[in-house]
Image (spheres, helix red, strand yellow):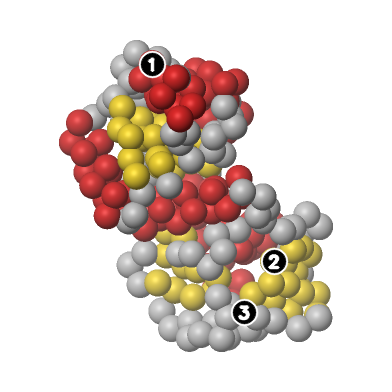
Amino acid sequence: MLVVLVEDSAPVRDALTAALRAAGYRVSAVATGAAALEAVAGPAAAADPPDLVLLDMGLPDLDGVEVCRRLRARSTVPIIAVTARGHQQARVLGLRSGADDYVVKPFAIDELTARMDAVLRRSAGHVVAPVIEAGPVRIDLSRRVVEVSGREVTLRRKEFDLLAALARRDGAVVSRADLLDDVWGLAPDDPGREQGLHSLEVHVAALRGKLDAPGAVVTVRGVGYRLAAGESTAD
C-alpha cells in the first residue's frame, strides 16, 4: 500500500514517514505541491501508482486547495487533507476541492491510520451504508431515524449528529477534539471550547439515557468516545 505524504516540515515529514512505515505502509514523502503532482500523476506513478495521498494544506509553493484540485483533475487517488486550520471554512474548501477526508493537527497516528483505512475501504467500493447497526441500536443516517430494539427514539439535532459522528467511524475512537470540531464547529483555539466540552459531556449523557442500551456509547478515558455494543460505559 503506497502512500504519498506531502509535508513541507522536515521533522513532521520524517516522523510521519517512520510511523506510517511502522504501521505497514510504503511511503513516498515529498515537500512541495509540484512534487506531489509529479508523484501522483507523473511518469513514475504510471509504474507504481499511489493508493492514497496525505496532503498538507499549508505548502510553500502552491496553496493546498489548488494542489488538491489539480490532483483530483488528474487522478482518482483518495486524498486526505492534513491541516492546522481548525476553521470550518478551511475544511469545507478542502473537501470541495476534492479531498475525501481531513485531519486537523495535532492528531494521533492511530486516528490517522483509522481514517486512512476508512477512505481506502470506500475507494475500493465498500461504501458506508446509510443504515448502521450497533447491537440493538439502528441508525438511519439519511432519514435521521434511530431505533433501539425496534423502538424509535426521538433525539435532538445535536444528539443525532453526535451519534452519527460516532457511527460513521465504524467503532473507532473519536476524540473529544474531533467531536467538538465536527458537531459543534469549535476549532482548537475557539474561546467557547471549554463550554463546548461541558456541552459534549451533557449530550453524551443524554444520548446514553435515551438509547438505554448498555455499551452503545463507550468512553475511552482521556481520549473520547466510540460506538460499540455490549460493553461497560463506565466513565
| Residue 5 seen in the current view | yes
Q: Which mark is residue 132?
A: 2
**Vertical placement of 141 versus 230: above or below?**
above
Residue at the location (57% across, 21% down)? 74
Packing grade of label 3 (10 A; few <14, some 14-19, many >=20) is few
Element under disc 3:
helix
Q: Can you tell which quarter of the image residue 105 is in?
A: top left
Packing grade of label 1 (10 A; few <14, some 14-19, many >=20) is few
166 or 6, nearer to the observer: 6
Q: Position of residue 136 (x, y in %)?
A: 69, 81
| Residue 81 seen in the current view | no
Element under disc 1:
helix
Image quadrant where one finds the C terminus: bottom left
Packing grade of label 2 (10 A; few <14, some 14-19, many >=20) is some
Per the model, the C-alpha gap separating discs 2 and 3 is: 20 Å
For badge 2, the amino acid type reads Ile
Per the model, the C-alpha gap separating discs 2 and 1 is: 40 Å
Residue at the location (33% across, 40% down)? 27
Q: Position of residue 91 (x, y in %)?
A: 51, 34
**Vertical placement of 217 versus 203: above or below?**
below
Q: Which mark is residue 209?
A: 3
Element under disc 2:
strand
120 or 211, nearer to the observer: 120
**Vertical placement of 199 versus 221: above or below?**
above
Q: Nearer the viewer, mark 1 or mark 3?
A: 1
For badge 3, the amino acid type reads Gly
